[in-house]
Amino acid sequence: MSIRQDLSGWQDIRNAPKNGTFILTRVGYYRPCVAHWATYGGRTRWGSDPEGFMEEDHFLQYWLTIDYEPTHWMHLPDEGYQDRVEEAHYALFHDDPTDVTERRARFFEEANETCQAFGMSRQEAHQLVDYTYDRPIGEPAKEVGAAMLTLTSLCVVADLNLFGCAEADLEKLQRPETIARIRAKRSTRHGRGPLPGFDPSTGGTRP
């Protein structure tokens, strides 16, 4: 499926902000367009920013005569995403703070699950762990950049919408039932080293 045809992470336009915020919009599977909800010439609708691409009189003619009715929307890629994840932290960690040690373990877990989902074997994973830890330690900022770049490259060749996937997971993270499950699971993590806690709702027991 083409990236243009992937609607994962897109939300119904009826839930989009109408406060002038620029967002990414689309009509069905057609190419996305940056737009905002605004009023020009007495007409209120979804449309593009008038500045920089046409004269004012031409823009008003366009605004008043052309219809654009998007069906889906999402936040602009990477704009505010880290801030919104930070906001989600409060619901999850406000009374049981997380730290770099826990976050790096969960990142490592998710990175392994991603590679596993794409067919990497346990043997290949162990080979790469040994290869990595036999090399000099890198700088965090540089390695985060490389991790983001290689994940984006993976999404390109796998035909996945990176930020669509990210927005879908963040939306799920903020659901009350997800928050409750994660908080319950984290409460069982102590004494397990880098391993996550277990999910009490599944009837699991501490291994």
Image: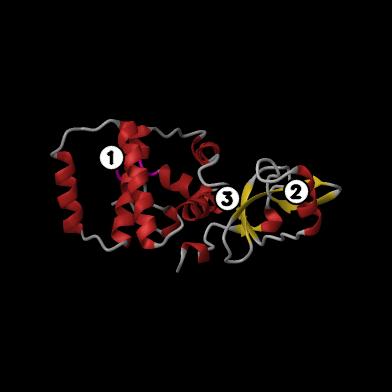
Which of the 4 image quadrants contains residue 87?
top right
> What kind of element bears circle 1?
loop
Q: Amino acid at mark 1?
A: Gly
**Percent x, y of residue 193:** 28, 39
Q: CA distance from mark 2 to mark 1?
A: 60 Å
Q: What range of the chain is rendered magenta? A: 188-196
Left or right: where 19 falls relative to 177 = right
- 12 in the magenta segment: no
Q: Which mark is residue 176?
A: 3
Q: Which of marks 3 and 2 precedes in the sequence?
A: 2
Q: Which of marks 3 and 1 precedes in the sequence?
A: 3
**Percent x, y of residue 55:** 73, 44
Give the residue at mark 2: 59
**Which of pointers 2 and 3 indicates the residue nearer the eye?**
2
Q: Residue furthest bottom?
A: 1
**Which of pointers 2 and 1 indicates the residue nearer the eye?**
2
Task: Name the foreground residue: 109 vs 71.
Answer: 71
Residue sitting at x 72%, y 42%: 20
Residue sitting at x 55%, y 53%: 177
Give the residue at mark 1: 193
